[in-house]
Amino acid sequence: MTDPTLDDLSVFVPVLLQALETLGFVARHFHPPRLAELVAGVGARDEALRAVRPRLDAWPAERAALRAPLVRAADHALAAFDALRAAAAGAEGPLAAFRAFRHVPLALEALYPFAQVLPPVSRFFLSPDRRADLDLQQRLAAAQPRPDTGLLHVDNTYDSRGGFSLYVPETYTPETALPLVVALHGGSGHGRAFLFSWLRDARGRGAILAAPTSTGPTWALSGPDPDTPNLKRIVADVCERWAVDPRRILLTGLSDGGTFAYLSGLEPDSPFTHLAPVAAAFHPMLAEFADPERLAGLPVHIVHGALDWMFPADLARQAHRTLAAAGAAVVHREIADLSHTYPQDMNPAILDWFMAA
């Protein structure tokens, strides 16, 4: 007899994944003047999910542990669609859309454990450039994860500050040192959520990923700086517990996180070998006060959107000129259709640059 749960999964999972991909598309292409047009263009992806969601309600009690995270993933995805439609119809401005996007990492966190057992979910948690790699998918499926691999959280519940979330590839073995990516969230963000901006790429490229949470509402961009010592502590902790390639420790970040990647990453005793600020603010004084020996040959990869309405693209152009003149090895990518949001599609290029150095 066919297990009806399997039939439900075969219908439900593809629709859920399509809905999440659609939300990712909206987040990547979000630009306040075009929000209504963008939301209208997603069609009925949320209605398709809403139609199959009740299939899970009929599952027997013994399937409760399996059902609960799938329900959470679906309900957060639907909440994101509802909030985006409300934002597009209302007058609250871009902040309402940003609040809608906060549901997406909650859905992804609920769904991620299924990557080890459901091939479609495993492919979903790979960047598009890795989804045709059958050897990689077989290695991921055959992995016997250690207790210290996968998604881990250190003092990083959503109501706490100063902790960090971590992804260690399930294929990790102590015999092979892996690159480390440290990714900083934007203002009012949280590392536990921002982790998912990089998870697909870390999983597909075999990198350890740490996503710290700032000690305050945002990073210490002025005044006392408790965040830089905390980042150093986190890096030291990760390097002590896992095999990390000391030549490849990347500090990247979005918006305030990108700005703080400049501030903290240019310090002379910074543990980071590469910097990759995204949609960040920059002031020439950062380079003027930086240690010349730190700047000499420092690999810096700048990504900025031509449509950025919060930090104009001229700031990134100025950062390129100033840092290059000071001796840094700068790559600058200005993305024509990018507003003030995170471009996950740029992660492969950043990692190619990072790992080739």
Image (spheres, helix red, strand yellow):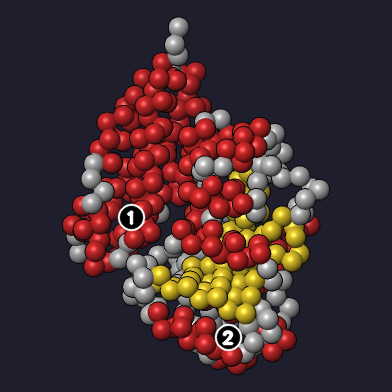
Residue 211 position by quadrant: bottom right
Q: Secondary structure at mark 2?
A: helix
Q: Nearer the viewer, residue 59 or 117?
A: 117
Residue 320's place in the image compared with 177, above or below, is: below
Residue 115 position by quadrant: top right
Q: Given the image, on which type of amino acid does mark 2 rest?
A: Leu
Q: Secondary structure at mark 1?
A: helix
Q: Residue at x 70, y 64 (%)?
A: 248
Is residue 256 something one can see in this rendering?
no
Residue 323 is marked as: 2
Instruction: Tell me, yes or no, whether the two marked residues, 1 and 2, touch with CB atoms within 8 Å.
Output: no
Horizontal side of 339 relative to 180 (left or right) equals left
At which x and y percent is residue 123? 51, 40
Q: Find disc 1 in the rendering and name its residue.
A: 26
Q: Given the image, on which type of amino acid does mark 1 rest?
A: Val
Question: Are there few (<14), some (14-19), or many (20+) residues within 10 Å of tag 2?
Answer: many
The quarter of the rendered structure image containing the C terminus is: bottom right
Q: Nearer the viewer, residue 337 or 291?
A: 337
The mark lying in front, picked from 1 and 2, is 2
At which x and y percent is residue 183? 57, 63
Q: Residue at x 52, y 42 (%)?
A: 132
Q: Residue at x 63, y 43 (%)?
A: 150
Direction top: furthest residue: 1
